[in-house]
Image: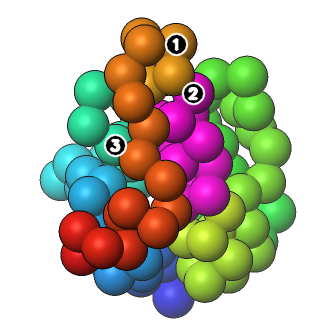
Amino acid sequence: MTCYERLDDLRERIRRQAPDVAVFLTPGEQILHVRRRAEPGAHIRWDHGAAAYLWVDGPDAGAQVGADAARAAERLTRTLTPRLRTSLRASGAAVPTEEARRRCT
């Protein structure tokens, strides 16, 4: 698979697992942009040498996200969710419980 195919696979998996997460590939770039609403985004790339998805920037720059799209999508989804909850709590907003979220969907 090419890096574009791998990034496209990851993009589709994230869209299925977390429909409220914006995820896109910019034409000509080999970087996947992932963000949840107003939260800081994550930038991910495929590294052929490491045979893994890697963080491009931020405190985890260069660290492995996952060796396959399924694991990487799961980790990204988990990673973005706590940041949203933390920022909501810090702003004083009410954070819905798991039970409340299930009722709304």
Q: Residues within 10 Å of mark 3 (few under 14, many from 20)?
A: some
Q: Is residue 43 magenta-colored?
A: no
What kind of element bears circle 3? strand
The quadrant the C terminus occupies is bottom left
**Which residue is tagged 1?**
90
Question: Is the stretch drawn in magenta largely helix, strand or loop?
Answer: helix
Q: Can residue 55 be seen in this view?
A: yes
The answer for how far apart the CA atoms under marks 1 and 3 are is 17 Å
Residue 62 in the image: above or below residue 78: above
Residue 22 in the image: above or below residue 18: above
**Range of the magenta residues?**
76-87
Q: Residue at x 71, y 57 (%)?
A: 65
Q: How crowded is mark 2: few (under 14 residues within 10 Å), some or many (20 or more)?
A: few
Residue 38 in the image: above or below residue 78: above
The reply to whether the C-beta atoms of the residues labelled 2 and 1 are less than 8 Å apart is: yes
The residue furthest left is: 27
What kind of element bears circle 1? helix
**Residue type indicated by callout 1:** Ala
The reply to whether the C-beta atoms of the residues labelled 2 and 3 are less than 8 Å apart is: no
Q: Which residue is drawn at 37% across and 22% down?
A: 93
Q: Can residue 5 be seen in this view?
A: no
Q: Could you tell which of marks 2 and 3 lies nearer the N-terminus? A: 3
Q: Which residue is drawn at 44% across and 37% down?
A: 95
**Which residue is tagged 2?**
86
**Residue type indicated by callout 3:** Arg
**Which residue is tagged 3?**
36
Q: Where is residue 94 in the image (x, y as percent from the top left)?
A: 39, 30
Residue sitting nearer the eye, 25 or 23: 23
Q: Could you tell which of marks 1 and 3 lies nearer the N-terminus? A: 3
The answer for how far apart the CA atoms under marks 2 and 1 are is 6 Å
Q: Where is residue 21 in the image (x, y as percent from the top left)?
A: 31, 55
